[in-house]
Image (cartoon, rainbow, N blue to C red):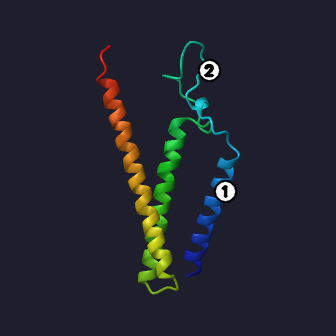
Amino acid sequence: MSSVNTHYQNQVADLLGQIRAHQGEPSNRADLIRSDTPGVGGIGHVNEPGQGNFATYMADAFNGVNDTQQASAELKNAYERGEDVPLTDVVLSMQKASIGFEATLQVRNKLIRAYEDIMNMPV
């Protein structure tokens, strides 16, 4: 019972920390595609991890969705075992996991479509 509540509280604290971290960031994301090499517009240039490149943001998003799904499964299992977990928390966490997965799926579909469009461009 307390491990589920502790996990849930840690998840909320992590989410608040992420929100606070993003509030301090500039809204302009042009630095994601910039390159340190003159004449190269970011293509073929890989930023070091932690510098805020696209791959890092995508990996963080995937990990966040995975964490949400794991927490949802844990809450559901705790509720099924009869622990003191409110049903509303279980349903809410399941909906958050579902929405996160659907959003990730839509982003993946858009990326694949963009890649196919680029590959089909005449040179």
Q: Which residue is mark 2?
A: 36
Q: Is residue 38 above or below residue 20?
A: above
Q: How many residues crowd around disc 1 within 10 Å: few (fewer than 14), some, or many (20 or more)?
A: few
> Which of the 4 quarters of the picture holds residue 112?
top left
Q: Position of residue 108 (x, y in %)?
A: 38, 43
**What is the residue that sits farthest to the front in this orientation?**
27
Q: Position of residue 116 (x, y in %)?
A: 31, 30
**Residue drawn at (42%, 52%) of the image:** 103
> Which of the 4 quarters of the picture holds residue 95?
bottom left
Residue 50, disc: none
**Residue drawn at (43%, 77%) of the image:** 77
User: Along the line of sight, which residue is nearer the eye, 59 or 117?
Assistant: 117
Q: Which residue is mark 1?
A: 17
Amino acid tagged 1: Gly
Amino acid tagged 2: Asp
* Secondary structure under the numbered disc 2 in the rendered image: loop
Q: CA distance from mark 1 to mark 2?
A: 30 Å
Q: Position of residue 22 (x, y in %)?
A: 65, 48
**Residue drawn at (68%, 53%) of the image:** 20
Q: Position of residue 55 (x, y in %)?
A: 50, 38
